[in-house]
């Protein structure tokens, strides 16, 4: 099993699995043009609790219903190589894939085809960064109105079998071939054959290619699907690849992929502000999960896990299904005004199914009717932390009632309410802001007005209260929490007053990666080399569970394709690019002005870090929202020097994860240098760098200016450190703007620049 996918739009599915095959082209006149299809197989039986019983590189996936023994199996070819001699007027190439689908579900199955991502063009080497050289576009034809392929387009066609007793019978193929020239069961495609365009993964319901009940397929159904491409000599030589997804669904009880199976790569690849439904394997309740602008996936429904299971037994949370380090026992729900406790688990279910169905604007002027989000259960802090968080507990509790791979939000940092709101330009500190209170009741947040209990249920339809996992520093009895108050417009993402642990509040979980997700720190040279050139993967930084895309670049090295995001944390040689000991990355602050001038006082002597926020002072007058959450480090912070920023020797340390380093200074022949990386891609302007989809530079990030003590040049310049000083007060780094790129630029160590790391 080489990969997996989460299906977004289909309503009935469970546990997706994916297997790859190539789609390769080399179009040039009278030269071979190779084609192969990477396909993902997704099989879902949806009538109870299911587990995979077979999944392999032989392109076979089976899902079994352990309760009623329903199953569905898909088998396909492992790859589909083709070749063509391209011509100036276009030349057809095609390949046929035979799928076998078997299910014993009474409802039969439905089968869909799509691309595996949200782009249905076919690019050279599978990367949109090569689009300037030409690419294959999907044909404009549809299943009900297929068309002949024009130059440099591609599509699919179904084999038509009219014999209903044949295992290859597919009633949907009849509507596909409504023109005399089509792909016959007995014939091969021709230049006049008609084709349909393949939709993107998010729109795969637009290409349902088969639908049969079990009586039609007692021994399984064999389906032939053809893929065709029209290649002209306007495209350069090379391999052109994409990936496809087959999704088979055998319908039953409405089920969804589980939160416990969700991965960092799946979260990373979701588009911002899009949602999917995931079920909790502990009770099969499902929740909306939304990829937020902070780059993280959040539950956008309130947790409603009960303290007992369906049989009435007190529920035991295990490390295999929950955010716990060992088995933790809950307690039966309460539904009355039982006195709440500090050190016992209490789960209040009396308002679980309530919604904000009406608003009295005379008393709650910031209330919004919201009938889509249930209030969920209310948990005292001991319950929210799976029985770990007692009255005497201090600091941050790492266990919770959340599913495995998910956690309660922190008080600050990348998995906090503060960071979430920061990326939407909302207040990050406690304030009165009626507009913010209204905003977070709506998409994409859907925070519900669930109130609390303490000991009785109160404030339903008026206030929303949401736990964090961090005890306040002021009062040991209190825990930081989010409060939205529609009565007075109070918006408090970091409330520390009256958040006593015995009260019952709501739980929202944020995805921080599965224990099995690959990490930056464990990434090896072999794993890097096994990635194809320009191919990427998603890794998790063990230090703060942040996700990064990592690409095997054309210079032979693996580079981060996202900017480093860590601050206010003590790191060690066990997890970071340090030779020994520990280093504390400073919390966000501002520095500069008149105190940052002169050869010996340039603000490059001690580490400093700045987080771009909605309230930051800035000389940039445009829309700042794309820059919220960016982190600027001065050079001592970047190279983990607590003091001695005046060194002229490269310290060979950094705040990169262990196994990673800052780029070195050098020319186009120097390994792991900015100059060599940009040279191999022919990048000589900022515009070309931003157009390169492989390396992940998406904007002009700007920097922190030591002279004006402000954020500057956001939208016009990008600045990144190397690990090589050029003098006592200066260091080499990358600077780019629309006019050029400068991979050996000299800048003062007191500036705040961004960081990208390269694998050692």
Image (cartoon, rainbow, N blue to C red):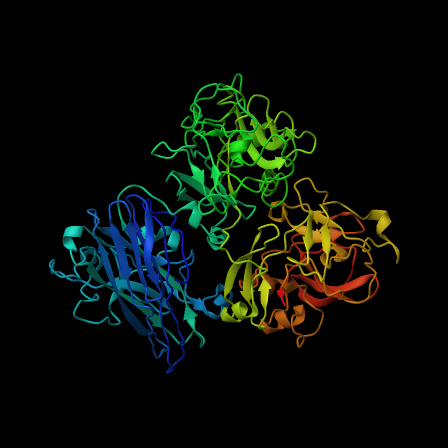
Q: Position of residue 367 (x, y in %)?
A: 51, 25
Relative to 216, is 479 on the left or the right? right
Residue 52 falls in which quadrant of the image?
A: bottom left
Residue 642 falls in which quadrant of the image?
A: bottom right
Q: Residue at x 17, y 51 (%)?
A: 214
Q: Residue at x 30, y 43 (%)?
A: 48
Does residue 546 lie above or below 534 as drawn? above
Relative to 259, is 166 on the left or the right? left
Residue 149 falls in which quadrant of the image?
A: bottom left
Which residue is at the front of the view, 336 or 391? 391
Relative to 254, is 434 on the left or the right? right
Q: Position of residue 415 (x, y in %)?
A: 58, 44
Quarter of the image with the C terminus in it:
bottom right
Q: Position of residue 283 (x, y in %)?
A: 38, 38
Task: Mark yes or no: residue 413 visible.
Answer: yes
Q: Residue at x 88, y 57 (%)?
A: 600
Which residue is at the front of the view, 697 or 42? 42
Q: Position of residue 116 (x, y in %)?
A: 39, 58
Task: Mark yes or no: residue 713 visible.
Answer: no
Does residue 362 lie above or below 410 as drawn? above
Which residue is at the front of the view, 344 or 613? 344
């Amino acid at each position: 099993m080489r990969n997996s996918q989460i299906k977004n739009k289909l309503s009935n599915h469970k546990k997706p699995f994916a297997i790859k095959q190539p789609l390769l082209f080399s179009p040039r006149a009278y030269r071979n043009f190779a084609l192969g299809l990477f396909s993902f197989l997704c099989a879902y039986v949806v009538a109870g609790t299911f587990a995979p019983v077979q999944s392999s590189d032989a392109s076979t996936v089976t899902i079994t219903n352990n309760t009623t023994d329903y199953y569905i199996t898909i088998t396909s070819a492992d790859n589909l190589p083709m070749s063509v001699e391209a011509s100036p007027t276009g030349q057809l190439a095609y390949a046929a894939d035979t799928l076998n689908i078997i299910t014993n579900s009474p409802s039969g199955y439905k089968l869909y085809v799509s691309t595996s991502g949200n782009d249905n063009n076919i690019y050279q080497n599978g990367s949109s960064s090569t689009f300037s050289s030409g690419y294959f576009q999907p044909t404009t034809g549809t299943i009900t109105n297929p068309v002949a392929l024009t130059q440099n387009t591609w599509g699919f066609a179904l084999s038509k079998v009219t014999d209903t007793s044949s295992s290859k019978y597919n009633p949907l193929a009849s509507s596909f071939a409504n023109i005399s020239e089509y792909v016959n069961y007995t014939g091969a495609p021709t230049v006049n054959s008609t084709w349909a365009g393949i939709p993107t993964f998010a729109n795969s319901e637009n290409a349902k290619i088969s639908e049969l009940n079990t009586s039609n397929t007692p021994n399984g159904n064999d389906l032939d699907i053809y893929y065709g491409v029209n290649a002209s000599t306007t495209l350069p030589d090379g391999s052109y690849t994409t990936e496809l997804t087959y999704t088979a669904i055998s319908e039953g009880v409405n089920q969804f992929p589980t939160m416990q199976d969700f991965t960092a790569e799946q979260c990373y690849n979701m588009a911002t502000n899009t949602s999917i439904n995931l079920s909790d394997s502990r009770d099969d309740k499902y929740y909306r999960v939304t990829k937020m602008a902070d780059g993280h996936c959040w539950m956008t429904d309130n947790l409603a896990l009960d303290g007992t299971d369906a049989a009435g037994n007190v529920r035991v949370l295990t490390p295999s299904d929950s955010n716990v380090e060992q088995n933790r026992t809950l307690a039966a729900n309460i539904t009355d005004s039982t006195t709440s406790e500090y050190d016992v688990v209490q789960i209040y279910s009396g308002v679980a199914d309530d919604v904000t169905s009406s608003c009295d604007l005379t008393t709650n002027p910031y209330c919004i009717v919201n009938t889509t989000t249930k209030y969920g259960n209310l948990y005292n802090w001991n319950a929210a932390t799976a029985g770990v968080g007692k009255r005497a507990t201090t600091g941050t509790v790492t266990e919770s009632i959340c599913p495995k791979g998910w956690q309660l939000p922190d008080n600050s940092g990348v998995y906090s309410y503060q960071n979430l709101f920061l990326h939407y330009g909302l207040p990050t500190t406690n304030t009165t802001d009626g507009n913010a209170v209204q905003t977070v009741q709506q998409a994409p947040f859907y925070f519900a007005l669930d109130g609390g209990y303490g000991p009785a249920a109160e404030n339903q339809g008026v206030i929303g209260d949401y736990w964090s996992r961090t005890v306040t520093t002021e009062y040991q009895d209190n825990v930081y929490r989010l409060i939205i108050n529609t009565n007075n417009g109070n918006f408090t993402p970091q409330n520390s007053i009256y958040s006593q642990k015995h009260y019952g509040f709501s739980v929202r979980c944020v995805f921080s990666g599965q224990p099995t997700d690959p990490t930056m720190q464990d990434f090896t040279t072999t794993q890097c080399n096994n990635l194809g050139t320009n191919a990427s993967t998603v890794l998790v930084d063990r230090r703060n569970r942040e996700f990064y895309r990592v690409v095997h670049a054309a210079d032979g090295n693996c580079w981060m394709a996202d900017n480093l995001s860590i601050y206010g944390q003590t790191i060690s040689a066990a997890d970071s690019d340090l030779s020994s000991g520990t280093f504390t990355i400073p919390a966000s602050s501002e520095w500069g002005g008149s105190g940052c001038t002169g050869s010996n006082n340039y603000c490059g002597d001690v580490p400093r870090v700045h987080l771009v926020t909605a309230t930051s002072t800035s000389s940039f007058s445009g829309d700042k929202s794309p820059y919220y959450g960016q982190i600027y480090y001065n050079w001592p912070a970047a190279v983990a020097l607590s003091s001695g920023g005046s060194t002229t020797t490269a310290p060979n340390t950094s705040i990169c994860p262990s196994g990673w380093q800052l780029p070195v200074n050098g020319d186009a022949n120097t390994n792991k240098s900015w100059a060599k990386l940009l040279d191999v891609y022919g990048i000589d302007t900022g515009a070309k760098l931003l157009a390169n989809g492989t390396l992940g530079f998406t904007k002009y990030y700007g920097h922190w200016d030591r002279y004006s003590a402000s954020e500057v040049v956001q939208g016009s310049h990008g600045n990144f450190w190397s690990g090589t000083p050029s003098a006592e007060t200066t260091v080499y780094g990358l600077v780019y703007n629309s006019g050029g790129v400068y991979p050996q630029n000299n800048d003062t160590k007191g500036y705040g620049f961004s960081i990208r790391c390269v694998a050692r």
